[in-house]
Image: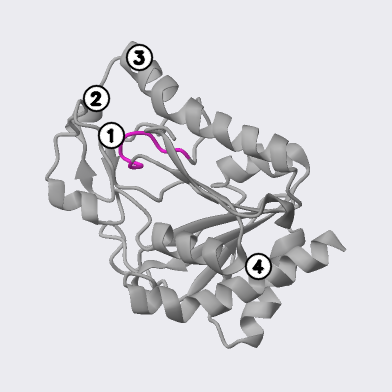
Amino acid sequence: MSEAWTSIAGNEASGILVIADHASKHVPADIDLGVSTKLLDTHIALDIGVAELAVELCRRLDIPAVLGGISRLVVDLNREVDAPHIIPTASDGHVLPGNAISHGERLQRIERFWRPYHEEISRVIQRMKPHLLVSLHSFTPKLATKPDEDRPWEVGILYNNDDRAARIAIPALEARGVIVGDQLPYSGKLLNATMNSHGEGNGIAYLGIEMRQDLISDAAGVARWLDVIASVVQSCSSSIEA
């Protein structure tokens, strides 16, 4: 284990690997973001419900996972290493004064958290050679900076150039009565760093799932959606493996 990532054991012969970049709200004791600790329980710090959903999904399907171990406010693990906002100085209207750091400090933080996380994903992929990556994220129903923006989707499916799994998952979700967004609430063409690197970069199909956070914010919600997500993952896996 590492402060940058945690893992969930599973049957690597399944060929399915779960990845969750924003599964943790952890801020190391030696890093002061300069904000109220209450903000660490909100969507700006982590993808609410994703860690819990990942645990249950891995248990249900007996598949492994690599989960991000630190808050996205420390380093955003779903950004390219040279992205301007990999260490955010503001998020959804909240200024992060503790992230106004020098270039050297920025590089140190990336080397401490971002690089070990992505190196671990690469190690697991090299070892198990999966045919499907499942990227789990969640989104807030309302952004403070865009109060008039409606986000009614229950699940969003994101992808960049490789839409193999997306084209299986979207109709499967719609058939179950799910309000599904195709490249919503944002586009995988613009926000897909981890899957671009480890999925498209290796020719591995991936399913980018964005759950609306209020649907999986408690154990009952996770249990309710587990059947849906597990079924879709299995459908994608079976079709792609064939």
Query: Of the residues tagged 3 and 4, which is closer to the observer?
Result: 4
In the image, residue 177 sits, relative to residue 157, either above or below, namely below
Q: Secondary structure at mark 1?
A: loop
Q: Earlier in the sequence, mark 3 or mark 4?
A: 3
Classed neighbour count for the residue bearing mark 4: other residues with Cα under 10 Å, few (<14), some (14–19), many (≥20): many
Q: Earlier in the sequence, mark 1 or mark 4?
A: 1
The CA distance from mark 1 to mark 4 is 35 Å
> Are the residues flagged by discs 2 and 1 in contact, CB closer than 8 Å?
yes
Q: Quadrant of residue 91?
A: top left
Instruction: Residue under label 1, please give it.
Output: 89
Residue at the image point whose x is 69% and y is 64% from the top: 166
The CA distance from mark 2 to mark 1 is 6 Å
Instruction: Residue under label 3, please give it.
Output: 103
In the image, residue 123 sits, relative to residue 230, either above or below, namely above
Res 58 visible: yes
Classed neighbour count for the residue bearing mark 2: other residues with Cα under 10 Å, few (<14), some (14–19), many (≥20): some
Classed neighbour count for the residue bearing mark 1: other residues with Cα under 10 Å, few (<14), some (14–19), many (≥20): some
Write the start and end of the magenta stretch as one range. Answer: 71-77
Q: Amino acid at mark 1?
A: Thr
Q: Position of residue 122 (x, y in %)?
A: 63, 33
